[in-house]
Amino acid sequence: MTTTLPPAAVSPPGSRQPASGDRAGSRDGEGSVQVHQDPALKIEEGALVIAVYGKGGIGKSTTSSNLSAAFSKLGKRVLQIGCDPKHDSTFTLTKQMVPTVIDILETVDFHTEELRPEDFVFEGFNGVMCVESGGPPAGTGCGGYVTGQTVKLLKEHHLLEDTDVVIFDVLGDVVCGGFAAPLQHADYCLIVTANDFDSIFAMNRIIAAIQAKAKNYKVRLGGVVANRSEDTDQIDRFNDRVGMKTMAHFPTVDAIRRSRLKKCTIFEMEPTPEVEAVQNEYLKLAQKMLDDVKPLEAESLKDREIFDLLGFD
């Protein structure tokens, strides 16, 4: 089945159209073709909005879902929004691959007034509310439009008004409209990385993207989540050079892999010292994001600089 999306608001290269940032007339950079969000679609003040980024396959969905579970364990009302056409962000929370917003909208010919919240919002572990935005068919549309439509739908049904924490789980490190759209809503970005060149190189690009968005939007860098890495020497070297900070460290733990196969969060695994250590690290990360996160003023590196910085002599 071919999904036909309504036309998105996209500025042509060199356009002087204002973006919907915090300052009137601001825009996302010369030649930007990113989707501009309606200012009326801003998520209400009061909710902590976190966007999780990182190289494809680095563990963003695992991090997002377990972080959502941790926030819920701290008594917070949590909404997780998966922003990837794979729509697999929330399956460890819901125990299923839920329908996407785009799939549901297509069934009603994009007449949002015909939808009920239960058509596209699904309750997961410990009350975490889960939404999968989905995406357009490959090569046919912009993921930024899909994210915008998802937030619009949530606002129309007043589903963001009683939410304490919103987590956007964002597709890989390609800096396009779909990648950038959640930055127009987020307070902080967490970047998931391993202790290797490729994922740190991707992190450097993500920092550059957030730098650009921070000129016109409230979004700021929150820190780094070191994932699937016993050591952090390369991450530490990069952080020291650019001004980043590691907020949590998850070494290679088989219980995390097995939790994905069991389609559950780490908080539902049989308690062992290893599992409890991971649970406590997620709980500490959630508490830090609530109480002790400080905006980071990092400076991304040129490609040659990062090449020369990382590795062994």
Image (cartoon, rainbow, N blue to C red):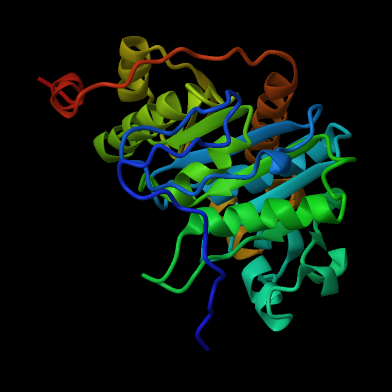
Task: Note whether residue 6 is visible.
Answer: yes
Direction from residue 35 to residue 71 in the image, left or right: right
Direction from residue 280 to residue 226 in the image, left or right: left
Residue situated furthest bottom in the rendering = 1
Is 266 drawn above or below residue 119 in the view shown? above
Task: Note whether residue 272 is visible.
Answer: no
Q: Position of residue 256 (x, y in %)?
A: 58, 49
Q: Position of residue 107 (x, y in %)?
A: 70, 82
Direction from residue 200 to residue 229 in the image, left or right: right
Q: Residue at x 89, y 34 (%)?
A: 75
Direction from residue 105 to residue 247 in the image, left or right: left
Residue situated furthest front in the rendering = 16
- Residue 115 found in image quarter: bottom right
Q: Residue at x 57, y 59 (%)?
A: 146
Q: Nearer the viewer, residue 126 or 275?
A: 126
Q: Position of residue 5 (x, y in %)?
A: 55, 72
- Residue 182 found in image quarter: top right
Q: Position of residue 119 (x, y in %)?
A: 81, 71
